[in-house]
Amino acid sequence: MIIQSLSSVTGSQWMLIFLSAALIGMAKGGVKGAGMLAVPLMAGIYGGKASTGIVLPMLVMADVMAVKFYNRDANWRFIWRLIPAAAAGILLAMVVGIYINDELFKRMMGMVIIASLALMIIQERRPLSAALTGGWVFGSVFGLLGGFSTMIGNAAGPVMTVYLLAIALPKNQFLGTGAWFFLLINLFKVPLHIFVWKTITWSSLPIDLVTFPAILIGAWAGMRIVRLLPEREFRYFMIGMTFIVALRLFF
């Protein structure tokens, strides 16, 4: 798979790449859903599958910053519930991605996310029992969906937002748990993109490195926005952003 070299990227493409990097940084700074908007922007430049390899190193850089800021707030009990199923979902998507176009899967993910949001709205009015949302089965289902969607299109943000909202974590634990989870699974994906899909190459890495300042600015802006949002408003903001992002997956 051939990726554009650094010197062949046009001015208009650089604008979209830097915008995407800033949105990714903003998402890792706490404004969940912002990074999903970067997915179609990058796909418009590089195509669906190739763009995932360009975006992944950006995500890892942003994940490191998010972990540094929210490190103390992670709830590792829920992270370990997600990781095994997420790894299985990534491996399944790796195989599927070799043979099948990803557009159908994006639409399927959109349907799953919207159904999950309906569950979340019900829970806002009548919370689910802790026996359901806090169990291994509930976490494994969302881990599998998250792993599959993050490998197919770096689109696990909405799935994990629904899960973290469902288990009713406080705002800072929500952000810290998500930060560590995404860093771990994104690092797990790197060798698969290099050796199996071949979407991370020596040509693509310089493009990612150049975007680091934009990621940093986006992360700073995201953390500032999150500090201004109270707990209840934060939860509803997450539901609204996730719904918008899920609709985007259909188009």
Image: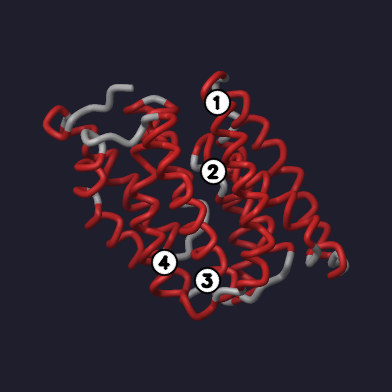
> In which quadrant will I find the C terminus?
top right
Res 236 label = none
Residue type beneath disc 4: Ala
Image disc number at residue 66: 4
**Quarter residue 56 falls in:** top left
Residue 213 image position (x, y, % from top left)? 22, 57
Q: Are marks 1 and 3 in contact (CB under 8 Å)?
A: no
Q: Residue at x 34, y 45 (%)?
A: 20
Q: Position of residue 54 (x, y in %)?
A: 34, 38
Which residue corresponds to the image point at 62% horizontal and 29% vertical from the top-left?
105
| Distance between mark 2 and mark 1 Cα atoms | 12 Å
**Which residue reaches farthest bottom?**
72
Considering only order in the chain, which callout, 4 or 3, is on the residue closer to the N terminus? 4
Which residue, given by chain and number where applicable, does mark 2 sit on? 150
Q: Pointer 3: what residue? A: 176
Q: Which residue is mark 1?
A: 102
The amino acid type, in three-letter code, at marker 2 is Thr
Q: Earlier in the sequence, mark 1 or mark 3?
A: 1
Q: CA distance from mark 3 to mark 4?
A: 8 Å
Q: Secondary structure at mark 4?
A: helix
Tell me whether the residue at label 3 lies in contact with that at label 2, contact meaning CB atoms closer than 8 angstroms.
no
- Closer to the chain start, of discs 2 and 1, is 1
Quarter of the image where the N terminus is located: top left
Q: Is residue 242 left or right of residue 119?
A: left
Q: Nearer the viewer, residue 175 or 198?
A: 198
| Image-quadrant location for residue 223 | bottom left
Amino acid residing under circle 3: Gly
244 versus 132 height, above or below: above
Give the quadrant of residue 124. Answer: bottom right
Counting from the top left corner in percent of width and height, residue 150 is at 54, 43
Tell me the SS state at disc 2: helix
Distance (Cα) linking label 3 and label 2: 18 Å
